[in-house]
Amino acid sequence: MKKKILVVDDEPAIVELIVFNLEKAGYEVMTAEDGLAACQKAQREVPDLIVLDIMLPGMDGLEVCRQILADTKTARIPILFLTARREEIDRIVGLEMGGDDYVTKPFSPRELVARIKAILRRSERDSERPEDDRLLAGELAINLQKHEVIVRGNMVELTAKEFDLLHYLASHPGQVFSRESLLEQLWDYNYFGDARTVDVHIRHIREKIEADPAKPEFIVTVRGVGYKFRESKRV
């Protein structure tokens, strides 16, 4: 069965370019030209991935992302942002709101398709893991199959990318990873972006799972190198 992708952009030429290349790559493509239509179509069709322009008329892409990820029916849909903005703050906000990746306009259609394939491959790998694939680390419990994180008895809501990063680090306790290696492993291609993307996600995870994010118990910074997960065990 073909994977379904929802493309949300108000520029007809951009939509036509993306649709042509995605259909050529074997995907079923739906489109929406504004935020409200995007939310309605995502709820109705539940696509496998959304390509979402940040600058939309009315409701912008960031608000669309927030609404989609807040809905339990669509919360696990990966989102790839399109943006004409080159400022770092716009990219960071999109990632912090739960976006999985971003591409800056003008973009290479080949790169866009490659990134989409990488995100979908990762989603498929996660869905094929056994139900008992769980990790415990002190008061932190991670269930990969259910995409659940429980800290000190409370459920924690993580974005898909935050969950992937936390689970990957927890699966390799004590091992130090550079930002570049995490990008290669979790973004699943030769990442063209900024290694600070990892820092953004780590900061957001710490704010959600650490009692004191300034003194992290789980994800530790190794100065000058990268990050490591302090302790975990598989059950």
Image (spheres, rainbow, N blue to C red):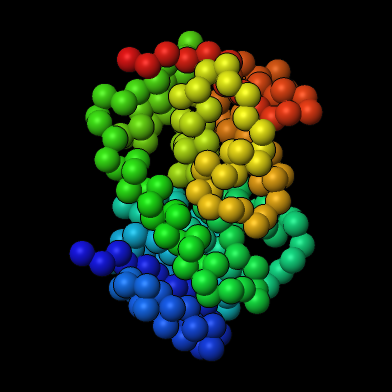
Please state the horizontal and vertical placement of residue 12, each as a whole percent of the image. 51, 88
Taking depth in this image into account, of 123 and 113 the one nearest to the observer is 113
Taking depth in this image into account, of 125 and 87 the one nearest to the observer is 125
Q: Is residue 142 above or below residue 16?
A: above
| Quadrant including the N terminus | bottom left
Q: Is residue 226 above or below residue 109?
A: above
Please state the horizontal and vertical placement of residue 94, each as a whole percent of the image. 61, 56
- Residue 12 visible in the displayed image: yes
Left or right of residue 202, residue 86 in this image: right
Q: Residue at horizontal 50%, vertical 49%? A: 188
Left or right of residue 170, residue 48 in this image: left
Residue farthest left in this picture: 1
- Residue 54 visible in the displayed image: no
Q: Residue at horizontal 55%, vertical 67%? A: 111
Please state the horizontal and vertical placement of residue 44, each as a whole percent of the image. 28, 66
Residue farthest top in this picture: 138
